[in-house]
């Protein structure tokens, strides 16, 4: 019985600390839910909130200037009425949150940028063009984000592209100013090994491409990294 209650307490604690991940693009409006009675934390991945503005009297807001995040709670008059909150970040992003309060514990809300920031322009000009391509491929292989880039996980949303012997599925995208990176999973559908080359995956606009390995065992897989650019 003691073990049952311990597991139940841990489960409830885990749920109360669940993180809301909210992909958002510049000048886009997103619906989010906060606690009606407790402070909820809002922050931007890889960035800092600089300003937050909304209808006066609709909310109580506390800024954490050191971390670049805010804590917000509706006033008693807006515990059952939605309101807008407009955010500006240090990297020049502008977001509009349409906020609804519910009888929930305080929420952790992470805004994940869908669009690159102005820092991406500087990063792409930091080295010779060929070196920038190599650096972007290296970042994608290591799972790092170049400065100012927006990194998006596609997960199960993206459909697979089928070839004769294998399928390809987009896993993640890196959005910069003039460059666009793709991380793709390549799965061998055969019961024997196959050999591939980067040229198979060339498309118009391809600037750089790399396979993690060219020999894929039976029913095995590898990763493909491709950089696209403006025409």
Image: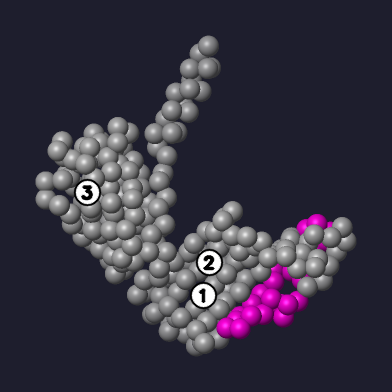
Query: Is residue 142 shown above or below 22?
Result: below
Q: Which residue is mark 1?
A: 180
Label 3 vs 1, first from the N-terminus: 3
Residue for badge 2? 173
Of the numbered discs 3 and 2, the one sitting upstream in the chain is 3
Q: Which residue is mark 3?
A: 83
Label 3 SS: strand
- Does residue 208 lie above or below 31 as drawn? below
Residue 166 in the image, given as x and y percentages of width and height: 77, 64
Q: Residues within 10 Å of mark 1 (few under 14, many from 20)?
A: many
Q: Is residue 89 visible?
A: no
Separation of marks 3 and 1 at Cα, in angstroms: 35 Å
Which residue range is magenta in the image? 197-220
Residue at position x 48%, y 17% in the image: 5
Estimate how packed mark 3 is, as few (under 14), some (14 to 19) or many (20 or more) residues with alpha carbons within 10 Å: some
Residue 206 in the magenta stretch? The answer is yes
The residue at the far right in this view is: 192
């Amino acid at each position: 019985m003691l073990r049952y209650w311990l597991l139940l307490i841990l489960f409830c604690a885990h749920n109360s600390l669940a993180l809301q991940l909210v992909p958002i693009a510049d000048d886009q409006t997103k619906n989010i839910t906060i606690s009606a009675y407790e402070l909820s934390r809002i922050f931007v991945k890889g960035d800092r909130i600089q300003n937050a503005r909304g209808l006066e009297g609709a909310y109580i807001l506390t800024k954490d200037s050191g971390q670049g995040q805010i804590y917000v709670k509706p006033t008693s008059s807006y515990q059952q009425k939605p309101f807008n909150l407009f955010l500006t970040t240090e990297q020049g992003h502008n977001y509009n949150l349409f906020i609804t309060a519910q009888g929930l514990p305080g929420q952790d809300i992470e805004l994940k940028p869908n669009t690159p920031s102005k820092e991406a322009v500087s990063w792409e000009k930091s080295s010779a063009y060929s070196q920038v391509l190599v650096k972007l491929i290296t970042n994608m292989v290591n799972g790092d984000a170049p400065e100012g880039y927006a990194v998006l996980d596609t997960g199960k949303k993206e459909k697979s592209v089928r070839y004769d012997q294998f399928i390809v599925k987009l896993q993640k995208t890196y959005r910069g100013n003039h460059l666009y990176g793709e991380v793709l999973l390549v799965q061998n559908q055969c019961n024997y090994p196959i050999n591939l080359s980067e040229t198979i995956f060339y498309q118009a606009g391809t600037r750089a491409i790399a396979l993690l390995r060219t020999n894929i065992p039976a029913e095995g897989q590898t990763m493909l990294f491709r950089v696209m650019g403006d025409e």
